[in-house]
Amino acid sequence: MTENVKESKAVPEPTLRRLPTYVHYLTHRVKKTRQFISTSEIAKALKLDPTQVRKDLAVTGITGTPRVGYCVAELVEAIGNFLGWNNLTDAFLVGVGNLGTALLGYQRLKQYGVKIVAAFDTREKVVGTEIHGVSVMHVDKMANLAKRMGIHIGIITVPAQAAAEVADKMVRAGICAIWNFTPTSLELPESVIVQNMDLYASLAVLSRKLHERLK
Amino acid sequence: MTENVKESKAVPEPTLRRLPTYVHYLTHRVKKTRQFISTSEIAKALKLDPTQVRKDLAVTGITGTPRVGYCVAELVEAIGNFLGWNNLTDAFLVGVGNLGTALLGYQRLKQYGVKIVAAFDTREKVVGTEIHGVSVMHVDKMANLAKRMGIHIGIITVPAQAAAEVADKMVRAGICAIWNFTPTSLELPESVIVQNMDLYASLAVLSRKLHERLK
DNA sequence: TAGATTGTTAATCGATTAACAATC
DNA sequence: TAGATTGTTAATCGATTAACAATC
């Protein structure tokens, strides 16, 4: 079997999760006037290991200068490029409840490469309305529209019991990456990328640690 | 140095994160009539390793029966106990924007051991109102009230630039566990439990994987 | 030059997975 | 009994951390 000349290893998921944190730190807490920064300084602020920071940054292809550090502006640029924050990807959101509405209001998502271009629901009360500038349509129109517009990302913010069905519909409509805000574990083909945003998993960690502490 | 007779190892965080998933699967997708279930069946449905499921369940102290499996009702009960879902812990939420409002509407949180008993903000428009049955007060009143009510959990849903200050206020008011929905990395004493719910970290993983796929 | 910082290779650590004896 | 499933110990895997040579 022939191997690729440049078979790049998959980037570890923990690294991917830390990259936006670096950008946030660099753009919001490092003075705009500072041109360079060392990994030990980043590490200290974010409570990480300096070596880890260097390894993380390395995946973006950027290099630093011994005794000087990394150029802040270049870093921000390189991470953005690496994560695809430049070319906006259109997304559909299904489920305009409390959380769905909140996400529609997150203008910030655009800075992170994703733009919600349409929202869907089944309830008469919301279908036909516009929320935070995004039209809400009946979910029956989702599949055709997704195909026609070549949508790749689907965001699921429906009640848990409807999640599986919505996910199936999305996949059949050609959506290949799903951001799942329900606690339901989706059974989908291997080829579909699923990223779970599980409130309850997160809360369980917090709650258990607190229990241990107070015990 | 004397060691505890029963020095129980800390439960791995990945395990804590999976426990709520088991409960959700068992209560919603396993027929109520089914009395027993094997770890291989759970594993298959959730795309996990059966051994891993057994190890996860073991931390709750529950045991199964060879050739029979685990009693579904007991499992749900044991996990709930372990995660402290029985005795409700009161929480304060600061930042009644899109996301904060959505969380106030999440009645489900109560099933997961946390009850938001008051919300805070600085904006005149919302201070004094009531959202989803929870009173919104000025953030200046938060510290005293938290001390008086013995609040342990704080939820931060303010804009990123206000996060550090709110977190400090919470800690000074005796709050020792913070659920942080902002992308800001909080610099707090070691003793404070911080659980980050980072939308952008999650989105970065999804977005990057999609990029790799389409490339 | 001297010394701080990068970039890389090696060691460690912890979680996942495999192997298998115990058991109902 | 036979065999499916548990529960535990050992092996593997991958991420983190340590060590250190290269470099500006």
Image: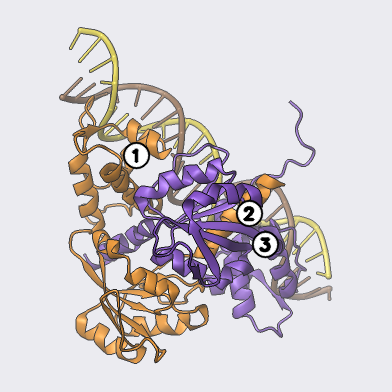
Chain colours: A orange, B purple, C yellow, D brown
Give the letter of the chain under mark 2. A
* Marks 1, 2: nearer the viewer: 2
Question: Circle 3 sits on which residue?
Answer: B88
Q: Quadrant of the C terminus of chain B?
A: bottom left
Q: Position of residue B187 (x, y in %)?
A: 44, 39
User: In the rendered view, would you say A60 is above or below A165?
Assistant: above
B151, A103: nearer the viewer: B151
Mark on residue A53?
Answer: 1
Q: Position of residue A211 (x, y in %)?
A: 67, 51
B72, B134: nearer the viewer: B134
Q: Earlier in the sequence, mark 1 or mark 2?
A: 1
Q: Is mark 1 in CB contact (under 8 Å) with mark 2?
A: no
Residue B186 quadrant? top left
Give the letter of the chain under mark 1. A
* Marks 3, 1: nearer the viewer: 3
User: In the rendered view, would you say B7 is above or below C18?
Assistant: above
Local crowd size for mark 2, using a 10 Å CA cut-off: few (<14), some (14–19), many (≥20): some
A12, B187: nearer the viewer: B187
Residue at 75% from the left image edge and 66% from the top image edge: B64
Secondary structure of the residue carrying numbered label 1: helix
Question: Circle 2 sits on which residue?
Answer: A208
